[in-house]
Amino acid sequence: MKIGLDSTVFKNRKFIDWLIYNKDLFETHISEVVYMETLLWYKRLDIGKEGFDDDLNELHAKIPFVSYDTWFMIAYRAINRRCT
């Protein structure tokens, strides 16, 4: 079954852990916008990009980026920008 996650899902750690445990039952997708929004939220929690990418890898999540170069530039700038 295909499922699409929005950024609010990542605030429910128990649900994310359940999805990881059952990852073989789902094809998980998130959009570029959800990726960026959640990445900034993880940064504010001091989990960072590595923690977020770890969760996405464990979920086997697919992210249909338009361009890897564009994504990398946006992610780099978002992470290196001070959150106020």
Image (cartoon, rainbow, N blue to C red):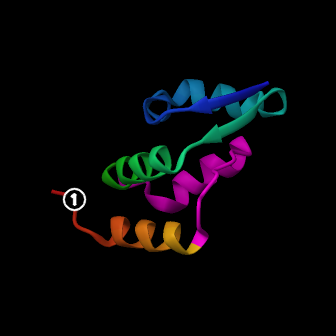
Image quadrant holding the N terminus, namely top right
Expressed as whole percent of the image width and height from the top left, the position of residue 7 reads: 45, 36
The quadrant in which residue 22 appears is top right
Q: Is residue 62 above or below residue 76?
A: above
Q: Is residue 62 above or below residue 9?
A: below
Q: Is residue 78 left or right of residue 27?
A: left
Work out which residue is located at the far front of the displayed protein and give it.
66
Image quadrant holding the C terminus, namely bottom left
Is residue 48 one of those drawn in magenta? yes
Residue occupied by mark 1: 83
Expressed as whole percent of the image width and height from the top left, the position of residue 42 reads: 41, 50
The residue sitting at 34% across, 65% down in the picture is 78
- The one of 3 and 51 positioned closer to us in this rendering: 3
Is residue 55 one of those drawn in magenta? yes
Residue at disc 1, secondary structure:
loop
Q: Is residue 17 above or below residue 37?
A: above
Check disc 1 and give the amino acid type.
Cys
The residue sitting at 36% across, 47% down in the picture is 41
Q: Which residues are magenta?
A: 46-68
- The one of 59 and 67 positioned closer to us in this rendering: 67
Q: How many residues crowd around disc 1 within 10 Å: few (fewer than 14), some, or many (20 or more)?
A: few
The residue sitting at 77% across, 33% down in the picture is 23
- The one of 84 and 21 positioned closer to us in this rendering: 84
Expressed as whole percent of the image width and height from the top left, the position of residue 49 reads: 49, 60
Work out which residue is located at the far left of the displayed protein and give it.
84
The residue sitting at 51% across, 66% down in the picture is 71
Q: Is residue 73 left or right of residue 1?
A: left
